[in-house]
Amino acid sequence: FATKLSSSQGDKEPVYRDCVKQCVRTNCTGARLNGFLSAQPQYMALTGWTCRDDCRYQCMWTTVGLYQAEGYRVPQFHGKWPFARFLCFEEPASALASLLNGLACLLMLLRYRSTVPRQSPMYHTINAFSLVSLNAWFWSTVFHTRDTYLTEKMDYFCATAVILYSIYLCCVRTLGLKRPGVSSMVGALLILVFTSHVSYLTFVSFDYGYNMAANATIGMVNLLWWLCWCWQNRRTLPYWWKCGLVVMLLHGLALLELLDFPPLLWVLDAHAVWHLSTIPVHFLFYSFLIDDSLYLLNTEKLGVKVE
């Protein structure tokens, strides 16, 4: 669990670097280190917090205090805003929001399973999509609890997997029910895209700009494909608007990330606000999935052409 080291204005400051060096030299060797380890709560040790990490945390706030005293804007440290740690949670608001998103997803999955019979054509595809989503929210919670080399990559990769699987879900709904071979080929292509994406970021370069561009591109494909389906079925399916509203909300709410500001009360930043805002979307999306799955089941029984 190697800690991510992205350089930012705050951690470039000599006062910060000197503070960390002095703290590590004084507190992270010999008897002082043994004292730190014996006094450290178990939950901090289990989540990988070291003496050096604690020095960085304390020196971060020392530097922030100096910036504020001089009237300067609060700087970032190692690619992130300063957050007030709660227990072992580095970003408490984002971690809580990710957990609530996961719980909302789980609750609606259970409702879907109790409402929709297994014979519905989309049943297994939607269940698989839900598991991919739950995995992503799990790693998002872990990442915002403790930002390390591993947890950061799992958060990024699992988020990409959700978008790609949403494209596959849309493909199955629009083409795969009538042409299973098409959805199989698209699924294989999406697996290849995901494998290439992960391999590049892991073995070549963990390029944040590339990752953002790649996710924006596949997100746009996902958005346009779902919206085209909604437009084509707006006169025949009374629940089409739920799907349209969901995809518009998800992409619109993502713009909250542009409101990059120092955390309010050192807890609530734009990323946390974005995660909190997506919680209700799960209920609307699964309402659409339930309506559509029941529609498909009924049309299959009646032998009616699927829209």
Image (cartoon, helix red, strand yellow):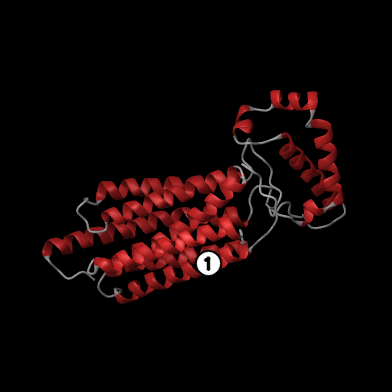
Q: Is residue 239 in view?
A: no
Picture layout, residue 82 above or below residue 211 = above
The spot of residue 62 in percent (x, y) is: 82, 44
Residue in the picture at 48% in, 45% down: 138
Q: Relative to the observer, which residue lies in front, 111 or 63?
A: 63
The spot of residue 55 in percent (x, y) is: 77, 38
Query: What is the quadrant of the C terminus in the image?
Result: bottom left
Q: Relative to the observer, which residue lies in front, 203 or 162?
A: 203
Residue 43 position by quadrant: top right
Residue in the picture at 56% in, 52% down: 153
Instruction: Look at mark 1 in the image and give the residue it sits on.
Output: 214
Picture layout, residue 156 above or below residue 92 = below
Residue lying at the far front of the rendered structure? 203
Residue in the picture at 54% in, 43% down: 142
Q: Relative to the observer, which residue lies in front, 243 or 53?
A: 53
**Element marked by disc 1:** helix
Identify residue type, mark 1: Ala
Q: Relative to the observer, which residue lies in front, 280 or 103?
A: 103
User: Is 290 positioned to the left or the right of 226 in the image?
Assistant: left
Q: Is residue 180 in view?
A: yes
The spot of residue 158 in percent (x, y) is: 48, 53
